[in-house]
Amino acid sequence: MKYYSLNKQAPKASFKEAVIKGIAPDRGLYFPESITPLPLSFFEGIEDLSNHEIAFNAIHQFVGDEIPNNKLRTILANVLDFDFPVIEIENNVATLELFHGPTMAFKDVGARFMAQCLGYFSENETSTNEVTVLVATSGDTGGAVANGFLGVDGVKVVILYPSGKVSDIQERQLTTLGQNITALEVDGTFDDCQKMVKTAFLDENLLQSMQLTSANSINVARWLPQLFYFLFAYKQTRSQGKEIVFAVPSGNFGNICAGLMAQRLGMPVKHFIAATNVNDTVPEFMRTQEYRPKPSTPTISNAMDVGDPSNFIRIRHLFKDNFKALNQNFSSYSFTDQETKEAMLQIHQNSSYCTDPHGSVGYLGLKKYQETHLDYYGIFLETAHPVKFLNVVEETIGTTLEIPPQIQKVMGKEKKSIPIRTYENLKGFLLGN
Ligand SMILES: *Cc1c(COP(=O)(O)O)cnc(C)c1O
């Protein structure tokens, strides 16, 4: 499979090149050259397929022959070794739980898949060409990437996170692993971290001495495997015979864009709802048809505090920049922290179900859409375990949460990070290694 850059100024890349580069030389996002729908029989018989078979069928065309089929199956078996249950909480309202992985946020699948692909590609490198994965995190990406890449030969991981601005659990998840993972604790905000990473990717001097790649959802190997979630949900809900809509709590819009890819593969879905917090660049676009990025505002659903969502361009491209076509398939609404907490409390009281702040935003998006579309069966994505946002969840619902074993494991470990302040500090660190 070839990938082209959405900026159209760079040569086409193979899957391998796209994964290793992360972003095209013209700064564009890579996009697959073709999307071939899966046969109708695949969807009609999906209940009889294992998650591993579903995933293999869905991802195979995007990898092509660049990873042998048996190796790809092994990778998928390693990546997908936990459950993705759909749980009905009200009539026509269900949640797809994506937090049963090692770091308890949905990013585990993409991070693991990318890590395993990179690991495979570097195994077959004859040179000592080590790849360095450089990633900025506002919380969940860092832990998922650290966990996914831990112990992968030929790959070094450097994570930048804003000091004092991630939750205690998130910080432990990215600073306690050691081995090939290093955490740089930045005296600054998430935007500062992201700026440093972007500067590094443009630094010719640096790029000459090392192979740098990104593990953000711009990387096709992190983005595409997220389409599995939607197929797994379809498998579990197809038999109720109603039209399905998905509500996806969105920040960088990679997850929902993967859902739209599943629809493009032929999965019957009526509509997608992108639910955001007050960082409402996309809801504004859907209202005004004007895309105006803005600085991000901090919220209680911090993994979605994004003012210029990088994957939205892929969504527009998927609809050939035709607003009418996009609008038929896709809606977007934004909600305040207050509304998010109220929803969390209401769900807990009415359904005895505990959502995290991101899932609560997804729920609100679904309910808003269902006001005018009563008969659709709605699935909102629970993208993180509520325990990752312990303080705000416990305070809102007035109950203490039980700490699951994955989280308990990191609670007692010692944090190791290297403090940095400037881009020169980062560059010095990278070149000194
Ligand atoms: C990353 C993240 C999101 C946003 O996903 P995007 O693909 O960036 O839209 C939502 N919820 C949680 C918990 C996350 O970690």
Image: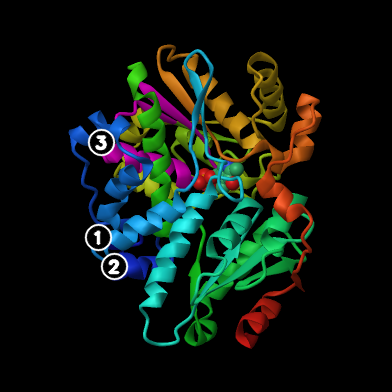
Q: Tag 1: Cα neighbours inside 10 Å, few (<14), some, or many (≥20)?
A: some
Instruction: Give how far across and how far down residue 99 sits, in percent.
Output: 57, 41
Between marks 3 and 1, how big is the CA–CA gap? 19 Å
Q: Is residue 71 left or right of residue 155?
A: left
* Residue for badge 2: 14
Label whose residue precedes the other's in the sequence (1 or 2): 2
Instruction: Give how far across and how far down residue 45 sits, in percent.
Output: 25, 31
* Residue for badge 3: 266
Please name the residue shown 71% across and 22% down the image.
345
Q: How is the image coloured?
A: rainbow
The residue at label 2 has a CB less than 8 Å from ligand 1: no
Between marks 3 and 2, how big is the CA–CA gap? 24 Å
Q: Tag 3: Cα neighbours inside 10 Å, few (<14), some, or many (≥20)?
A: some
Segment tinted magenta in the rendering = 243-272
User: Residue 61, relative to residue 372: is it above or below?
Assistant: below
Tell me the element at label 1. Answer: loop
* Residue for badge 1: 64
187 and 391: which is toward the camera? 391
Q: Tag 2: Cα neighbours inside 10 Å, few (<14), some, or many (≥20)?
A: some
> In front of the other: label 3 or label 1?
1
**Image quadrant containing the N terminus:** bottom left
User: Residue 330, relative to residue 156: is it above or below?
Assistant: above
User: Residue 276, relative to residue 115: is it above or below?
Assistant: above
**Image quadrant containing the C terminus:** bottom right
The image quadrant that residue 320 belongs to is: top left
Please name the residue shown 33% across and 55% down the image.
73
> In front of the other: label 1 or label 2?
1
Q: Is residue 243 visible?
A: yes
342 and 5: which is toward the camera? 342
Tell me the element at label 3. Answer: loop
Q: Amino acid at mark 2?
A: Ser
- Please report contact status of discs 1 and 2: CB closer than 8 Å, yes or no: yes
